[in-house]
Amino acid sequence: MLKNTLTEILYVLVGLVCLYSTVKIVRSKDHPSRWPTALFWFILFIVFTFSRVGMIWGDAKVKISDTVIGYLVIILAVLSALKLVKIGKFSESTIEFKKESAMKIGNKIFIPALSLGVVAFIVAQVWAKQLGTLIALGAAALVASILALAFTRGKVSDMVEDGSRLLEMIGPVSILPQVLAALGSVFAAAGVGKLIASGMSHVIPQGNILAGVIVYCSGMALFTMIMGNAFAAFAVITAGIGLPFVIAQGGNPVIVSALGLTAGYCGTLMTPMAANFNIVPTAILEIEDKRWGVIKNQVPVALVMLALHMVLMYLWAF
């Protein structure tokens, strides 16, 4: 009950950030695409805040139907496809405050950022069963926000304004992880894994363990590049390749699964579809090449890591 309540509260808070952006855009008369952009963020506010709002007080029946949510997502996709969601102007005071703070604080600003991982790890280790990993991340975000305010001596309004700015800079790509995760579930339910297994049976020689390992790791990386999410790819590729061509040949399921998932993350480093890894940093760091700026530097490392995954799986799992 507590886990569900806290999780839903986190989603409501995310929705409120979208609502703030909506109100700000509506009030901005010089916005290049005011009403379509406001509609996009308002729909996200509705989806995040009210889709399962009853979970806050333990009543799962109080929700927006999945069909309605589906239609809303289609509207979001149309607005994005037509490039109607655009970035407006931001408060000069906030931009100046950011520059001044950066000069004063220096590298200490990385302490709140590092606290995200540290606090999330600690909370997840201690209260994983009671709260879950999402609550751990929410608690870490709260601690990081408090530390950031303490280091910068800024106002909560500055934090809200800059958070809204980053959200709008990222734009529709910000919801790509959720959409791709849902797509992965659809693929798994539709039996795509079985279809892949049927096709691979004509490619991978029966009993060739090395070929199975190479195709499995490569498939995880490639499908993750398409899906943008290693978790979404894992269910499909493991069912289609990992189980019949690696584990069924005597591979240790624990080792194969662990290395298979992280092999997928090698693909994450090489695709713009992994927006939270490769697009968000370009917005935060204000890199000119929004799509490939981070990826270009990650591809060599990702390919080396992928090759090492194949070697380790072959040596450790059998």
Image (cartoon, rainbow, N blue to C red):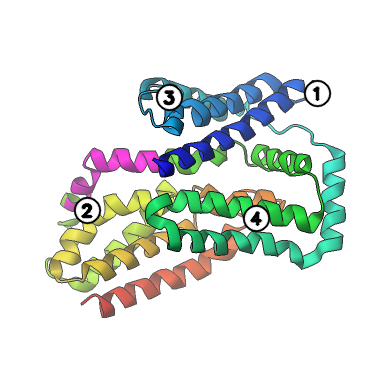
In the image, taking residue 241 as reference, residue 124 lies left or right, namely right
Amino acid type of disc 1? Asp
Q: Choose top left, top right, bottom left or bottom right for residue 61.
A: top left
**Residue 30, which numbered label?**
1
Q: Choose top left, top right, bottom left or bottom right for residue 45.
A: top right
Q: Residue at horizontal 27%, vertical 80%? A: 315
The majority secondary structure of the magenta stretch comes to helix
- Looking at marks 4 and 1 on the same chain, the residue that comes earlier in the sequence is marked by 1
Circle 4/circle 1 CB separation < 8 Å: no
Residue 129 in picture, x, y percent from top left:
37, 55
**Residue 69, which numbered label?**
3
- Looking at marks 2 and 1 on the same chain, the residue that comes earlier in the sequence is marked by 1
In the image, taking residue 309 as reference, residue 142 lies left or right, namely right
Q: Residues within 10 Å of mark 3 (few under 14, many from 20)?
A: some
- Dot 3 falls on a residue whose secondary structure is helix
Residue 300 in picture, x, y percent from top left:
52, 69
Q: Quadrant of the N terminus?
A: top left
**Residue 240, which numbered label?**
2
**Residue 144, which numbered label?**
4
Circle 2/circle 1 CB separation < 8 Å: no
- How far apart, in angstroms, are the residues tagged by discs 4 and 3? 32 Å
Q: Residue at horizontal 75%, vertical 52%? A: 149
- Dot 4 falls on a residue whose secondary structure is helix
Q: Which residues are magenta?
A: 181-197
- How far apart, in angstroms, are the residues tagged by discs 4 and 2? 41 Å
Q: Residues within 10 Å of mark 2 (few under 14, many from 20)?
A: many
Q: Residue at horizontal 20%, vertical 56%? A: 200
Closer to viewer: mark 4 or mark 1: 4
Residue 28 in picture, x, y percent from top left:
78, 24
Vertical order, 137 against 245 (above or below): above
Question: Is residue 289 visible in the rendered structure shown here?
Answer: no
Vertical order, 231 against 78 (above or below): below
